[in-house]
Image (cartoon, rainbow, N blue to C red):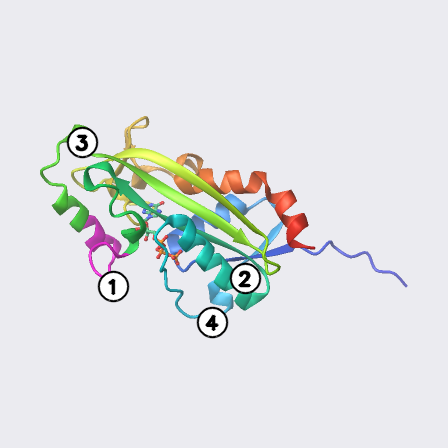
Amino acid sequence: MTYAKEPLKKTLVLATRNAGKIKELESLLSGYGLHVLGLGDFPEIGEIEETGATFAENSLLKARTVAKATGLVALADDSGLMVDALGGAPGVYSARYSDPGATDERNNQKLLDVMQDIPEEKRACRFVSVVAAVAPNGVELLAEGRWEGRVLFAPRGSGGFGYDPLFLDLELGQSAAELSHADKNARSHRGSALRALLADWPDFWARASR
Ligand code: ITT
C-alpha cells in the first residue's frame, strides 16, 4: 500500500536569543515553506560568545556554532547601530553599549547622554544587519542590509526593540518604534538583508543538501 505523503518541510534554526529579532525574522520567513525552530528547542546550546570584530564575523560565528550543534541549517543575524558622530559606535557593541549586562533602556540612555550636545544635522546614523545561513556540510551564505536615519533627542514610540525609539526614518518622519511590524520589516536593515539572502535561497539549499 502507498501513502500520499506531504513533502517534508525544510527545517531552519534561528541562531538568536533576541526576542525582537525572532519576531521580525519569523515574519520575514513566513510563506517560504520552512519549519522554523529557535534556540529554545536546543537548551543544550549555551551562550555563544561574540568575539568577532565585524558584523559578518559574529553572524558567521553564531550560525556556524548552531549548525554544528544541531546538524541543521542555522540562520543568524548580527546587527547594530552605527553613528557617524561617534566614529561608527556603538557598532558591533550595540547590545552591550552601556555595560556588560545592558538593557535596551540603559543603552538608549547612554546614547542620549553621549550625544546630548551634538546638533541635529550631525546626528546621522544607520542600522546594519548581516545575516548568515550556514549548513552542517559547511555551505555558507551571507547578506547585508542597511537603514539610514538620524538619532533623535528623546525616545518616540513603543514598538520594536533596542534603539528603535531613538532612530528616526527621515523619509517617513517616524521613529522605528512608531512603525507597524510590517512597515519596519519593509524598510529595515534586517528586512533588506534577509530579502537579499532569500534571493539566493534555492541555490543555497541545493548546495546545503549535497
Ligand atoms: P543575538 O546575538 O542572540 O542575536 P543580540 O541582541 O546580542 O542577540 P547582536 O549582538 O546582533 O544581538 O546585537 C544587536 C543589537 O543592536 C541589539 O541588541 C540592539 O541593541 C541593536 N539593534 C539591532 N537591530 C536593531 C533593530 O532592528 N532595532 C533596534 N535596535 C537594533
Mark 3 lies within 8 Å of ligand 1 (Cβ measured) = no
Sooner in the amino-acid sequence: mark 2 or mark 4:
4
Instruction: Quickly name the residue at label 3.
Output: 122
**Disc 3 residue type?**
Lys
Q: Nearer the viewer, mark 2 or mark 1?
A: 2
Kindly indicate whether the residue at mark 1 contacts the one at mark 4 (C-beta within 8 angstroms): no
Q: Secondary structure at mark 3?
A: helix
Sooner in the amino-acid sequence: mark 4 or mark 3:
4
Instruction: Quickly name the residue at label 4.
Output: 43
**Disc 1 residue type?**
Gly
Q: Residue at x 25, y 58 (%)?
A: 103
Q: Nearer the viewer, mark 4 or mark 3?
A: 3
Instruction: Quickly name the residue at label 2.
Output: 67
Q: State the extent of the magenta-drawn residues as a range.
A: 96-109
Instruction: Quickly name the residue at label 1.
Output: 101
Mark 4 lies within 8 Å of ligand 1 (Cβ measured) = no
